[in-house]
Image (spheres, rainbow, N blue to C red):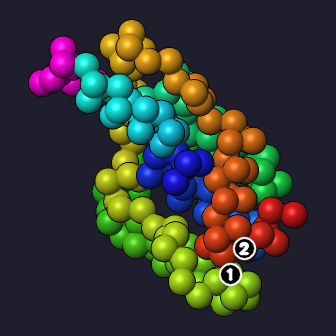
Amino acid sequence: HDNTFTHLTAPRLLYGGIYKHLNETMKLLWTADLKMNTVHVRDVCRAVWTLGRHPEANKQVYNVVDDANSTQGALAELVADIFKIQHDYYGTAISTLAKTDIASVAEEANDKHLTAWAELCSKYGLQHTPLEPSAGHELLLNKQLCLDGRKLRALLQLDVPAPTIDKLKEVLEDYASMNLFPKELLL
């Protein structure tokens, strides 16, 4: 849709709503400085269109990422501000221990999030939402995602150069308008 960011951002927005519902601190593995690229879907579509119309782009690789140089901490701050929740990190020591059985850690976190999400959907009458707050264990690993988008920038300037509270609220308001997310969590 017109207001969504990558698959990494949407679940984080759901987690914010879940932790508001649970009235708990949102705890994240690793640290705030974990790099995470983002890009607005509008810019993904523009990039596909632009590159598709440039023959010299054929058989070339372009990283379609925004200019934000986002980190887990920056995204968590935005989510925490939107939902007026606290967030914290388990840090490297505990996260390294969790890494030895990351599949179980992911399963436990997903159970917690999916149970709370089901409660929210029931409470607010969301019957058929495709939104799901689960993450594969590979997304919980301490893997930096920091691609260089300069090659694309030579052909295209982004409409949304970085995630902002307003842009993320647009995503949530859009979800709420389609009865996919509880609007009550945005109040």
The kind of secondary structure element at disc 1 is helix
The prevailing secondary structure element of the residues shown in magenta is loop
Image spot of residue 41 (x, y percent): 48, 43
In the rendered image, which quarter contains the C terminus? bottom right
Specify the quadrant of the image occupied by residue 25.
Answer: bottom right
Image spot of residue 171 (x, y percent): 64, 53
* Residue 59 within the segment the image draws in magenta: yes
- Closer to the camera, 97 or 154? 154
Residue 77 appears in the figure: no
- Kind of residue at disc 1: Leu
Image spot of residue 63 (x, y percent): 33, 26
Write the residue at 55% across / 33% down. Answer: 71
The kind of secondary structure element at disc 2 is loop
- Disc 2 marks which residue? 182
- Residue segment shown in magenta: 55-62
Lateral position of residue 154 relative to residue 88, left or right: left
The nearer-to-camera label among 1 and 2 is: 2
- Disc 1 marks which residue? 120
Lateral position of residue 100 relative to residue 76, left or right: left
- Kind of residue at disc 2: Pro
- Find out whether the residues at labels 1 and 2 contact each other: C-beta distance under 8 Å: yes
Question: How packed is label 1: few (under 14 Cα within 10 Å), some, or many (20 or more)?
Answer: some
Specify the quadrant of the image occupied by residue 113.
Answer: bottom right
